Image (cartoon, grey):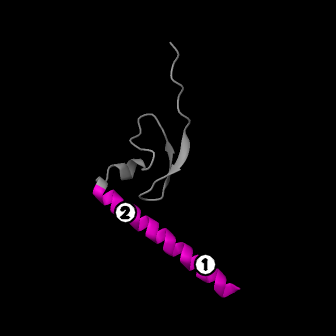
Amino acid sequence: MATKPQPITRTRTCRACGQSFEYPLAGSAATRHHCEQCVEIPAAYRRVVERLLIRVEALEAKLKRIETEKQS
């Protein structure tokens, strides 16, 4: 019987905090979408944090775009 090939470890970005993490790692609680720290946060709070992260990233991109327009 053939053994199942091991998954390739990849660097992922947490949807809640934006931190990079390796997935999958043996013994790690991390999921495809959340790092080990954020996976412990209750799902309802994690969803709120994910939305806030998306909004903050959008605002940062908008500020960067405004700054480059001012320099031109």
- Residue at horizontal 55%, vertical 47%? 11
Q: What segment is highlighted magenta in the picture?
A: 44-72
- Residue at horizontal 65%, vertical 87%? 70
Residue type (three-letter) at the residue carrying disc 1 = Arg
Secondary element under disc 1, as helix, strand or loop, is: helix
Q: If the image is split into quadrants, where does the C terminus sit?
A: bottom right
Within 10 Å of disc 1 (Cα), the crowding (few <14, some 14-19, many 20+) is: few
Q: Is residue 7 left or right of residue 67?
A: left
Within 10 Å of disc 2 (Cα), the crowding (few <14, some 14-19, many 20+) is: some
Real-space Cα separation, disc 1 to disc 2, in angstroms: 24 Å
- Of mark 1 and mark 2, the one earlier in the sequence is 2
- Residue at horizontal 41%, vertical 58%? 16
- Residue 14 lies, in percent from the top left, at 46, 54
> Can you identify the residue that label 1 sits on?
65
- Residue 26 lies, in percent from the top left, at 45, 34
Residue 26: assigned label: none
- Residue 36 lies, in percent from the top left, at 40, 47
Q: Magenta segment, principal secondary structure?
A: helix
Between 11 and 61, which is closer to the camera in this rendering? 61
Q: Residue furthest top?
A: 1
Would you place residue 6 above or below residue 63 in this image? Answer: above
> Can you identify the residue that label 2 sits on?
49
Q: Residue furthest right?
A: 72
Secondary element under disc 2, as helix, strand or loop, is: helix
